[in-house]
Image (cartoon, rainbow, N blue to C red):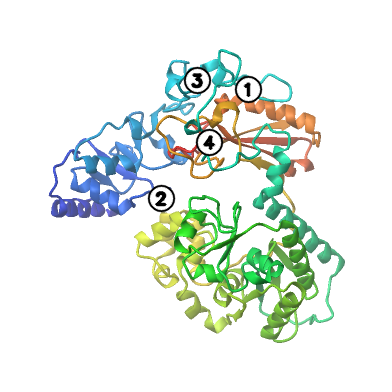
Amino acid sequence: MKADKLQNQFQDESIIHSDATTFWHSDETTFWHSDATITYPSSDELKRLVGENGGRYQHYFSKTHVTHVIATNLTSSKIKDLKKNDQVVHPDWIVDCVSAGKLLPVDKYLLYSTNKRDGTELKFNFDAKKTPESLQSHVIVPKTGKCLGENECIPHLKNENGCIPHLKNENGCIPHLSKHDYSVNETKKLPCKAGDPNFISEYYSHSRLHHLSMWKAELKKFTIDIQKKRKQFNNEIVGKKFNRLIMHVDMDSFFVSVAQTIDQSLKGKAIAVCHANKSNGSSDSYSSIASCSYEARCFGLKNGMMLNKAKSLCPNLICVPYHFDQYRKVSQKVYKILSSYTCEIEAVSCDEALLDITHIAGDVYDLAEKIRKDIFEETKCTASCGIAENILLAKLATKQAKPNGVCYIQKCDVPEFIASQKVCNLPGIGAIYSEKLSSLSILTCADLQKFSLFFLKKEFGQKLGEMLYNFCRGEDSRTLKLYEERKSVSAEINYGMRFSSMMIRQKGEGNPLKYMGHGLCDNVSKSIMISSPTNSSELISRYCLQLLHLFTVIAQDIRGIGIQNDLCYLKRTFSQVKINVLYQCSISILGIRILNGYEQIF
C-alpha cells in the first residue's frame, strides 16, 4: 500500500512539473535508486529528472519492474537480486541525458554489464581474463610504446617470494613516458612505492592509522594490567549501591594541542595537522586533515576534510606535520592520570577514554575538574569531560562540553537533553543513514521518537532499528569493555601500490584525487585454514601467495593488500589466514561486496 501511494504521488508530481521532451518511456524504463550509496545529484533530484523526462521511478526494489539501477556501488546482496538484463548505471547518465535533451548510449555509464543468475560469476566492464586485443582499451603505452598483452598484464606469481616481474617493452626496457602519461602531478616528488627496499618501513612510519592502532593496543594492555593489579581504591565506597555513572574524557584537538605545546607561536591561530610538504599547504593538495584547531573550525573546517577545500575556506591556514613520538608520550601521561582515579577504564583511543566512576566518592563536577587540571598541568593540553548514566549520554555530553569544559547530564534532565540532539550525532549514523533519516524528515531525536520500533526495524534493519529506537530516548545498555581480548592481528597497505607500469593512466583521464592513493576500489578476500597455529613468516607468506594466485586479477590493477591472522583459532587445533586485495577494475569473487571504482583514480 505504501509503495502504491508513493508511486501515485510520483506520477502526479511528474505530470505537474513535466514540460520537457520525454525520451524515457514509463512502460519500458523503470529506475530504482540504491539507498546504500550517496549520489550526486541526490535521490530526490534524480527522481525529479526521471519523472520530468518520461521515466518511471520505483521507490522499492522490484525484480519484476526495475530495469535500471542508479548507484555508484552496490552490496553483494543487491547484485544477486539483479536480473540478467538489468543495467546498473552511474547517476551521470541521467544528468547527461537531460543536459543533451536526448537518450545517450548507456555503455560508458554502466558499472556492471551482466549478472549470471547461477551465483558463481559476475562480469564487469573490465574482465580479469580479457584477451590481449580487448585489453587495448585498458592499458595504453603512448606513441612508441605498444599495447600490453595478457601475458604482460597478468604475470603468474610463480617465484617463491611472490614478487611481480617488471614489465618491459620489445626492446627489453621500460618504455619512456612523458609527464602527461603519469598519474601524478609533475610538481610533486615521487615517493617510495611498493617494491622499493624501504617501502614497508617508510609506509608504517608515516601511517597515522598504524600509529593509532598500535597505541590503542598498548593502552588497552595498560588498562587491563592495572585492573589485574588493583582491585580497589582507597577513595571507593564499598558495600553501597549507586546508579551507574560514566565519565567520558576526550582531549581537545589532540594533535593540534600537542603541536601548540611544541611551538607556542601556533596558539590562537588556524592550524591543521596533515601530511603537507609546506607549512602553508597547497591549494590543490588532496591530503587529508587529521585535526584542526577551533580557530580553523570557525571557517567551516572539519577533521577529515581535504586540504585543498580547507585552503579555499581558510587561505591563511597553517599546516603542521605529525609528531607521533610526542603524541604517544602525552597519551601515556593522560592514561596514568586516569588510572590514579579508577581502574575501570576503557581505552577508546590515544586521546579518549571511558571511566566508570560509579563508586568514586565526592562531587562529580569536582572530580572532572580535578582530572582536567591534572592533565593540563602534566601535558599542557586541555581535555573535556562528559558525565551521564550511560556511554551514549556521556559522549553526547562531551560534545556539549567542548572545548575545555565539563557537562553533567543528570537523570531528570535526560528527556529534554536527548530530544534536542541531532540524529547525525548518534553513534553508528554516518552520511548514508543521515541522508535517509533526513528524507524521512527526521533531524533530531525528538523527530525520531515519533516512529515506532516496528517501523524503524523495517526501514533500517533489526539491529540498527532497535538501536535508533533506544538511543533517541537516551537508553544505552552497553558496558565498558574492560577485558576485551584481541581477536586478530592484521596488516594492510593500500597506498603506493604500483606494479611497474601502474603509473600509466588511461588516455583522456585526469589526475588522481589523492596522489598514489588507491581511490574507489573493489575489496575482495579469501581465507585458508592451517592445520595448526603458527607465527612463521615463511609459512604465512606461502599460504598468502597461494591465495593471491586464486584471485587471477591483473597485477597492475592491485591497489592494496592486507593479511589477517585470526587469533580466535589459537584456542583450537588450527589457525586461519585471510588475505584481502584491493584492485582497480570491477570483479566479484564469490559474491564478496563490491565497491566499484567508477572514479578514474589510478
Spatial CA span between label 2 and label 3: 31 Å
- Mark 4 — residue? 592
Q: Is residue 530 above or below residue 319?
A: above
Q: Nearer the viewer, residue 461 or 134?
A: 134
| Mark 1 or 4, nearer chain start | 1
Q: Secondary structure at mark 2?
A: loop
Q: Are marks 4 and 3 in contact (CB under 8 Å)?
A: no
Nearer to the camera, 247 or 5: 247
- Circle 3: residue type: Lys
Query: Judging from the image, what secondary structure is the residue with disc 4 in?
Result: loop
**Label 1 sits on residue:** 166
Amino acid at pointer 2: Ile
Q: Nearer the viewer, mark 4 or mark 3?
A: 3
For the residues bearing labels 2 and 4, Cβ distance under 8 angstroms: no
Q: Residues within 10 Å of mark 1 (few under 14, many from 20)?
A: few
**For residue 186, above or below residue 548:** below
Q: Please give the name of the residue rendered at 58% of the width and 77% of the height, measured from the top-left corner.
A: 401
Horizontal and vertical percent position of residue 194: 65, 34
Q: Nearer the viewer, residue 538 or 343?
A: 538
Mark 3 Cα-neighbour bin, 10 Å: few <14, some 14–19, many ≥20: few
Q: Which residue is mark 2?
A: 38
**Among numbered discs 1 and 2, the one appearing first in the sequence:** 2
